[in-house]
Amino acid sequence: MNVLDRLLLAVNPKAALERAQYRELYRSYYAAADRGRKKGGWTATNATGEVTNRPERDIVRARARHLEANDDMLKAVVLDLERNVVGTGITLQARVRDQDGNDQEELNNAIERAWRRWSRPENCTVTGNMSLWEVCQMAVRRRYVDGGILVLKTYASGAFRLQLLEVDDLDTSILKHGGNRVVGGVEIDEYNRPVAYHLRRQEVSGLWSGKVVRVDAGRVIYLPHFTRCSQIREMSPAASSLPRIDDINLLVEAALKKEQVQACYGMAVIRNTPGNLGGIGRGMTGTAPGQEEKNEGYPMEYIAPGMIKYLQPGEDIKPIAPSGVSSTADAMIRTVQRQAGAGAGLSYEAVSRDMSQVNYSSARQGMLQDRKTYGELQQYLIDHFLEPVYREWLSWAVLTGQVVIPDYAGDPERYQEAVWIPPGWEWIDPLKEANANARALETGQTTLQKICAARGEDWRELLEQRAREIAWLKEFTGEEINSDGKKS
């Protein structure tokens, strides 16, 4: 109770009680909702995801693209995601089974061979310059930087192809089509489900042709980054990291300038005697008393290693050596790199490649958490991109006779069963991991399929290749070789 409360209590107890009650009501139960002096500048509003993102979406995307092209820190995050989410590609393993549940190996192999042929650059995209592996990398990159990407399933000259479009191609000027709303170029029904996309026909030069094409949602694979259920359009997941990355760029630039100035060593010559003594002393020049001295400026002198220079009488040398070092820049860069990586769900070591502050245990723990992030993104890519593309491709391949399945139309889902094998990762200590896998396999805690999938390999191909190698060893050595490759 302050002095004012005490005075009011003595004069008007009722008013003092009401004052105390209102103060108690104003006090927040949650510290995060405190509206006092400390948090008075923290202003925030509640709105739907689309209302929140719409005004800043284009600005954030433009700034993210600028840093993508000019900043090494953001580029390191993008490259790390590309390398570990897509790597050398996500491999298809067809899983068609007969009525008894046995794998139809011949058909599965035929599907996989046809899929690999189609995945080549000349067959995969309408432009003929990107393979399916590169399309996956582009999807991961653009989803992190731009917030999303559009992939159109098209048929060019009767061939199934993919067409990549940026989110800039969505026409935001249309607000309604028929009875449906159009939000940011996405036409939605009463349940906010996309039914069509309104796309601008833009030239590569950036000029708009003036045409807008309405494409049915069944032909479009939209890969946005959503954080709220009320979003219709994407928002770049790099948004939270952009201000700090830009600030650290300014810090680095200032630190470099400081180091450049510090590296410059100069000297200034100080004249301790006046210059108007009119020829007194050896080599002195000046003006006679009463005459004005001409302002011709001081001559520039240069120094060289081993040089001996005689100065004029009364002249002295003072070195110019800027002091101080940029001691805080390194720590600040590490901090911002750690924050930028955390914004993408990655560790500092994964983004910076700096392993100077870790040991085996901490490095392994960081890798495990990073791989969970990679695994989530891989599953998203499989569910939202690879699976839809594979289903459409297989139907087209059967219709065109590239894959022969007589009863495909009767049960297409049965023939569309597949397993996707993402790229594998190596461990810090392969011997420890190999022993652990062998022990888990012996005790039935894992399977060969899971172990091979973790390494990005097909267990069937591994066994087939191993059988061929053992058979060759038997033939070459003439001795009996067991399944471990050792003499019996």
Image (cartoon, rainbow, N blue to C red):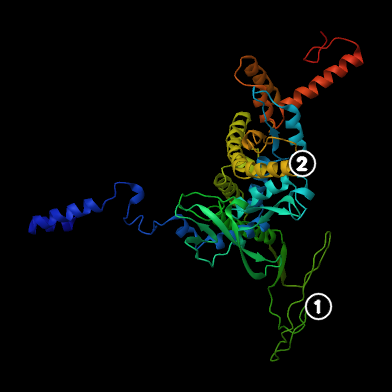
Numbered tag placed on residue 78 in the rendering:
none
Looking at the picture, tell me which residue is in the foreground, 83 or 481.
481
Looking at the picture, tell me which residue is in the foreground, 287 or 369.
369
Which residue in the structure is indicated by mark 2? Answer: 401
Image location (x, y in percent) of residue 163? 69, 54
Which residue in the structure is indicated by mark 1? Answer: 283
Q: Nearer the viewer, mark 2 or mark 1?
A: 2
**Alpha carbon distance from label 2 to label 1:** 101 Å
Looking at the picture, tell me which residue is in the foreground, 435 or 400.
400
Image location (x, y in percent) of residue 43? 39, 59
Q: Residues within 10 Å of mark 1 (few under 14, many from 20)?
A: few
Q: Is residue 267 visible?
A: yes
Looking at the image, residue 464 lies above or below residue 19: above
Looking at the picture, tell me which residue is in the foreground, 403 or 150.
403
Tag 1 secondary structure: loop
Say left or right for 158 vs 210: right
Question: In the picture, residue 275 is in which quadrant?
Answer: bottom right
Image location (x, y in percent) of residue 99? 64, 24
- What type is the residue that disc 2 sits on? Gly
- What type is the residue that disc 1 sits on? Gly
Residue at 60% of width from left, 29% of height from top? 361
